[in-house]
Amino acid sequence: MSEFSRRLPVYLLLDISGSMAGDPIEAVRHGVRALISELRGDPQALETAYLSVITFNSSARQVTPLTELMLFKEPQLSAGGATALGAALKLLSECIKAEVRKSTETQKGDWRPLVFILTDGAPTDDWREAAAELKKTKPANIIACAAGAYADTTVLKEITECVLMMNTLSAGDLAQFFAWVSSSVKMSSKSLDSKPGANIELPPPPQGFVIVP
Amino acid sequence: MSRIGEATLADGRKIPYVITDNPPRGGMKYTYFAPDKSYVVQFFNEPNKVDRNMTARLEAIIGRYNPTVSEAKGGAIGNDEKLASYFAGRFCWPTDLVVSPEFGIVSPAYPKSFFFGENASQFLDLKGKDKKSNWFTSSNRRFLNKSELGDFRSMIQMSLLLARSIRRLHQAGLAHSDLSNNNVLIDPKSGNCVVIDIDSLVVPGLFPPEVAGTRGYIAPEVLSTMELDRSDPRRMIPSSVTDLHALAVLIYEYLFCRHPLMGPKIFSSESAEKDDYLGLGPMALFIENPDDDSNRPSVLKTTIKDLGPILEKLFLRAFVDGLHNPPLRPSAMEWERGLVKTWDLLHKCSNPDCEKKWFVLYDVNNPVCPFCGTRITDKNIVRFELNSEVRGHDGEWRKYSELDVVHNTPLFKWHMYSNVFADEKADKALQAYVCCHNGEWFLINRSAEGMLSPQGNPVPAGQAIRLTDGTMFRASRHERGMLIKVKII
C-alpha cells in the first residue's frame, strides 16, 4: 500500500519426505490452498501478511519466495526422500536475512516473521548448528508442529519453545493444523500489538493437539 | 462436519446452535451460528476467566443498560419502543446469557447488508464475509467493485451514525472499550454501520473488563501504560475518553481511507514493534499536525481542511490537542452535531465521474471539489444561514449553522428551531422544501407552523416564500425559531 506500511512475513516449512507420500501430502496441499483462501478473506491479513513456502526432503528449497497473498501461487508439492530439517532451517535463516525488511533510521521494517514448521519425522541431516543459530538470534516467532507418532519433539524443542504435537497425520488433523495457522496469522495481523518484546498471542491449539512443555 | 448443540439460557429457555470444527474466533470468544443463522451463540476462549464480575457486567448490559430494548421490557431506563427499535439497528446487542453447556452469550446475527453479496469483488470470493471497515478504508479497496464503495456522503452518514451510537453509550455512562475497525461493520453502499462486540463494555460501578484493545485504535495513554500493573494508578484503562480516540480514528479512516497516526516518521530503528509502540503510544503524532510535519506523508491529496472548519477543528482537538491529553478530545455528541452540520454543507460534485460524488462546500467563493478538482458548474449556489436568537437578548441573532440548498432540499424541525437536534428523537416530518422554478428560488411551506414572510406576514402550509439574495425571514415566529438569511451566489 503506502511506502510506510509494514508486512507480516509468514514462512511455512513443510516436510515433504517420503513418509508424507499419499494422503498426508494431499492433505498438506489442500491445507495450503485453504490457508490462502482463508487469509485472502481477512482484510487485515490480506493487507499485511506475506507468505513463503520452504519445503524439505533430501534437501531444502524455497518453492515460493515471500509473496503478497493476492499474488501467491500454490506450489507444486510432491513427497519423497529424506528429512533435511537442518538444511531447511539454514535456508530459513538466509531467506529471512534476504527478504525481511529491517528497521533502520530510514526504513520502516517488517514485523517479526511468523514461522510454522510441520514435520512428521526425525531429521536425517545435521540440524544442530542451524537450530542453535535460530535459537540464539531469534529472527522470528517459530512454531513447530510434530505430526504423527514418529516426529521428534526434542529436536523441535531445540529450535523453539513453542512446539505442538498432533497424534496422527490424518487429513482431519492436517486440515485443523492449517486452520490453526490461518487463525494464528489473522490474530497476529490484528493484534501485532505493539508491546515491544512481549510474546505473541496465538489462538488455543485445535482439539487433540498437545503443547509440548 | 457439524452437529447441533443446545444452549440453556439464564431464563431456562433452550436454543439450538450448529457446532462446527473451526468456529470463527476473536480475541475473547468463538462463535457458533443458529441453524437458521438468525442469532449467534458465543463462548469464551478462556472459560476459567469467567467470574462473578463478568457475569454481573453482562447481566447489566443485557438488562438495565440495554438501549435496544424498551424500559417496559426490561431495557434501559427511559427507552421507549421507538428508540429501542432505532438502536436495535445500530448495535448488535447481546440478548441472553447462556448458562449451559458453559457460560456464553447470545447475540442477534448481523443484518444482511453487512455481509458481502455475490458481486462484491472480481478478485476475491467475498460472498458471505462480514463487512469489516478495513475492506473499505485500506488498500483492500482496490479489490472491491465500485458499487460497494459508497461515496463521500455515505461515509459522512456512517460517521454520523457511529458518533450517535457512541454518544448513546456514553450518555448512559457506558464505554465500548474496544472500538475498532473489527467491531464496527460498515456498509458504505447504504451509509450504514453497526457496532458489534458489545460484551466488553465498561459498565458504571462494575469491575471493568480486561481488554487490550486493537492496534491502531488503542488510545496512546492506554498503550503507553499497558505494561504497568492493573493496580498501578498510572495505568490507563479503556474508558469513554479512550473510546473517543478510537471514534475519531474511525471517522478519519471513513473520510480519508487512511490512518491518522501511521505516517512515514521512524520512531525507532531498533525493531518494527518498538517503532509501532512509540508511534501509536507515547510519541504518537498526527500525520496532519500543523506544527510538526515530521510524520506527514509526502502526498496528501485531501486534508482535514477540505472537510470545512467544523470537522477540521474537531480533528485538531482529537489528534493534536487531545492526542496526549484525553480530556480535550471532542465528545461523541460534538462529533454527532459537527457531522450533522457538515452534512448540511454537502454539495454534489459536477463531475459525473468523481469517485466521491459529494464534497463539503464550505467556501462558496471557491466551489471546487477537493477530490477530483472540478469547479462546480451550478448556475447558482444557494445558502441558508440559520441564525438563532441569543438567549436573554431579544432581537439579537447569532449564526448557528448553514445549509447548502438546491432544488428539492428538505427542511426539517432542526433547521427551523435552534433547540431541536437531528438525533434519534427528532421529528423527521418534512417541514418545508426548496424549489427552483424557471430560474427563481422558492421555499415552500409544507407543514411548518409560524413561518413568517420577509415582511413578517404568516406563511401557512402550502404557501411559498420567494427567495432572492439577501432575503431574511423567520422559519418560525415561535420560541427558538430560526431567522434564515438567504445568499444566492
Image: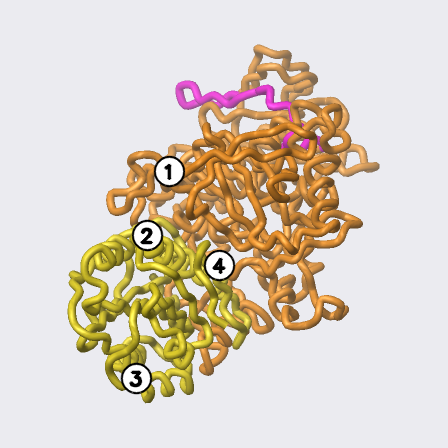
Kind of element beneath mark 3:
loop
Q: Are marks 4 and 2 on the same chain?
A: yes
Going by the numbered disc 4, the residue's amino acid type is Pro
Q: Between marks 1 and 3, how big is the CA–CA gap?
A: 45 Å
Callout 2: chain: A
Check the image and name the residue furthest to the right.
Answer: B392
Task: State which chain is coloured orange.
Answer: B
Q: Which residues are magenta?
A: B419-442
Circle 4 Cα neighbour tier, 10 Å, few/some/many (<14 / 14–19 / ≥20): some
- Say whether marks 1 and 3 touch (CB < 8 Å): no
Going by the numbered disc 2, the residue's amino acid type is Arg
Give the image quarter of residue B378: top left
Q: Are marks 2 and 3 on the same chain?
A: yes
Whether B106 is among the magenta residues is no
Most common SS among magenta residues: loop
Kind of element beneath mark 2:
helix
Q: Between marks 3 and 4, how big is the CA–CA gap?
A: 29 Å
Whether B422 is among the magenta residues is yes
- B54 to B238, vertically: above or below: above
Q: Between marks 2 and 3, how big is the CA–CA gap?
A: 34 Å
Labels 4, 2: front one? 4
Residue drawn 37% across the image and 62% down it: A48
Callout 3: chain: A
Kind of element beneath mark 1:
loop
Task: State which chain is coloured yellow.
Answer: A
The answer to which of marks 2 and 3 sits earlier in the sequence is 2
Tag of residue B128: 1
Tag of residue A40: 2
Q: Is residue B422 left or right of residue A32?
A: right
Callout 4: chain: A
Labels 3, 4: front one? 3
Tag of residue A203: 4
